[in-house]
């Protein structure tokens, strides 16, 4: 199976701080869905930012869609094909209305205003968010903002979804709706989540980020009778 993303021996440290990532190896193939767990400050969000070029590793190699990515220009194509949903929706939403926020990225892809409008309507319908279309973004609840952030990314039709703690601020009903949405998507997905119940509903494959490395969980042993 062709790998969409490969991280090879990734190291990273913030200035004057101890290393956050210490030799991370990771790969993601088409259609694959992987959850990542780990303590606060372990470097999970940093890992996402390295994939899309917002942070540059101090050592190691990022390969995306079969090409090595080193300089800023290399990551422009990556950001068109990898949709990152930030942990804090306020980092992602900045237009006056929901429709304008969703249309923003689509217009930047070169779509005409008419094409963007069609895509926005289709995305809102897909996520059952039509009632938020003309709402002021800053007046939305935390859960509504999170779903609109997802809509902004899905409207751009990425090959990969990176979701950073997507259940934050979601009530139980909205969480179930999110699970339904994610399970009906064809894109490869990497999901950072502390919530084991949510993780189990969207994938059986997960990794732990501990001491700067991604580690597969130990298999559960059955007690002998």
Image (cartoon, rainbow, N blue to C red):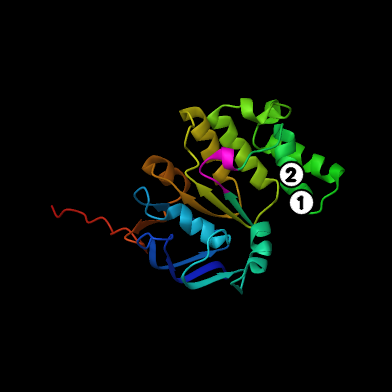
The local crowd at label 1, few if under 14, some if 14 to 19, many if 20 or more residues have their Cα within 10 Å, is: few
Q: Quadrant of residue 73?
A: bottom right
Is 187 situated above or below 91?
A: below
Residue 11 occupies which quadrant of the picture? Answer: bottom left
- Provide the residue span drawn in magenta: 85-91
Q: Nearer the viewer, residue 175 or 134?
A: 134
Q: Which residue is mark 1?
A: 108
Q: Secondary structure at mark 1?
A: helix
Above-or-below relation of 224 to 57? above
**Distance between mark 2 and mark 1 Cα atoms:** 6 Å
Q: Give residue 3's quadrant in the image.
A: bottom right
Q: Nearer the viewer, residue 202 or 100?
A: 100
Kindly state the secondary structure of the residue where label 2 is placed. Answer: helix
**Left or right of 103 on screen, residue 91:** left
Q: CB of mark 2 within 8 Å of CB of mark 1?
A: yes
Q: Is residue 162 left or right of residue 137?
A: left
Residue drawn where x is 81% and y is 39% of the image: 117
Q: Which residue is denoted by mark 2 in the rendering?
A: 104
Residue drawn at 46 percent across, 29 percent down: 172
Residue located at (51% from left, 43% from top): 87
């Amino acid at each position: 199976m062709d790998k969409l993303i490969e991280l090879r021996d990734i190291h990273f440290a913030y200035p004057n701080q101890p290393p956050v990532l210490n030799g991370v190896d990771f790969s993601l193939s088409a259609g694959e869905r992987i959850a990542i767990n780990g303590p606060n400050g372990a470097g999970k969000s940093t890992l996402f930012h390295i994939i899309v070029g917002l942070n540059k590793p101090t050592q190691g190699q990022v390969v995306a869609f079969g090409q090595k990515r080193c300089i800023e220009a290399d990551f422009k194509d990556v950001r068109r094909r990898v949709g990152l949903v930030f942990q804090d929706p306020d980092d992602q939403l900045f237009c006056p209305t929901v429709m304008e926020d969703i249309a923003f990225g689509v217009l930047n892809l070169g779509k005409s205003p008419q094409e963007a409008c069609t895509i926005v309507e289709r995305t809102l319908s897909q996520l059952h968010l039509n009632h938020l279309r003309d709402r002021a973004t800053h007046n939305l609840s935390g859960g509504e903002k999170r779903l609109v952030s997802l809509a902004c990314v899905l409207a751009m039709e990425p090959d990969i979804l990176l979701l950073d703690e997507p259940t934050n601020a979601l009530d139980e009903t909205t969480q179930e709706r999110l699970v339904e949405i994610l399970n009906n998507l064809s894109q490869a997905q990497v999901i950072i989540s502390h919530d084991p119940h949510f993780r189990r509903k969207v994938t059986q494959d997960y990794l732990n980020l501990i001491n700067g490395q991604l580690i597969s969980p130990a298999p559960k042993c059955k007690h002998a009778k």
